[in-house]
Amino acid sequence: MANKQASITTIATHLGLAVSTVSRALSDHANIREDTKERVRQMAIKLNYQPNHLAAGLRKGHSGILGVVVPHISGYFFPTVMHGIEKMASKAGFHVMLCQSNEDVKQERANLKMLMNAQVEGILISMSSTTHDYQHFEKVQNKGIPLVFFDRMPDLPTTNAVVLDDHQGAFGVVKHLVEQGCKRIAFFSGPQHLNINKNRFEGYVDALESFGLLLDPELVFQLPNLSKAAGAEGMNQFLQLDSPPDAVFSSYDMPAVGALEVLQERNIRVPQDIALSGFSNEPFTTLISPRLTSVEQRGELMGEAAVRLFLQMHKRTDNYSPQRIMLKPQIEVRGSSLRNLL
């Protein structure tokens, strides 16, 4: 009876041959006689032998595997990026090995070590929110493994990355709010050591300056996390001010929902009294009332671009220069900020 788990060793045992002989016969090695090759082929068919292409690839120095590390796969953004990565990688003949850091730099380091041990041909990564030291990234680069960051990236001189123009996205939201008549625009800010949060905050600040509005430190709330509760906390803090904001721009969508719930509980009208906007364009932004204005992050395009950049690095010459691809954001204007149509 055929053995579904048959190996080269199984074939060798049945035929009384050395494992090395069977391996060379299956590889059509020139030093193996044709009658031996045929005996091996027939036994392989009889035993339902399935070659381990991964092991063969590793022996030849290439695995055909592209490693990916994400902070998490909850929500909408990172699964969308993964869809783009897997689609483009598959077209290029690569398999994807996915790891989660769970926003933990220790897990991130372990992920990279495991992927390097698996001899992946490249690594795409969005770094964790707890990553402050970049030595583990430099180890990957020093081994000559193509390393591409997406969305979140470190401040390293040789970084290859695909990112959204978060500055432009934030600037555009503030511009829209100003056009709706808002003058005291508050901001929910994320951890500033992450490039995405730093760029969103700078976009907010630059837009205020561009439209002649002063930056009021009382109107900037540092999110302790990205939950609804954090947004509710920030909104309650703003409402205690002598001069509350007439708009709140959150650097993430979920805290904006928390702010909306506080406003609705207090019978404060949105957007007539306080306009709202988020950032990420999560699917739930169209399911709440009013629907939430937000910034589309182009996740699938980001994933596809990250793989294309890896493929360029994979074929690179000695004079290959690091690249940073920046995608244009798209502001989805909805009822939570549209005052002029009311």
Image: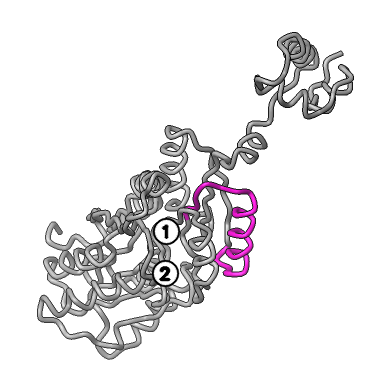
Q: Which residue is mark 2?
A: 154
What separation in Å lies between label 2 and label 1 (alpha carbons)? 8 Å
**Quarter of the figure with residue 58:** top right
- Looking at the image, residue 110 sits to the left or right of residue 3; the answer is left
Work out which quarter of the rendered image holds the N terminus and state it: top right
Between 257 and 316, the one nearer to me in the picture: 316
Give the residue displayed 58% in from the left and 61% down from the top. Answer: 101
Q: Residue furthest front?
A: 31
Dot 1: what SS?
A: strand
Answer with mark 2 or mark 1, whichever residue precedes in sequence: 1
- Looking at the image, residue 149 sits to the left or right of residue 27; the answer is left
Give the residue displayed 31% in from the left and 54% down from the top. Answer: 291
- Find residue 211 and name its label: none
Give the residue displayed 57% in from the left and 69% down from the top. Answer: 105
Work out which quarter of the rendered image holds the C terminus and state it: bottom left
Residue 50 lies, in percent from the top left, at 71, 23
Q: Amino acid at mark 1?
A: Phe
Q: Is residue 185 magenta?
A: no
Residue 24 lies, in percent from the top left, at 71, 25
Q: Which residues are magenta?
A: 102-124
Query: Taking the image as drawn, is residue 92 in sight?
Result: yes
**Quarter of the figure with residue 241:** bottom left
Relative to 162, residue 131 above or below: below
Q: Which residue is mark 1?
A: 149
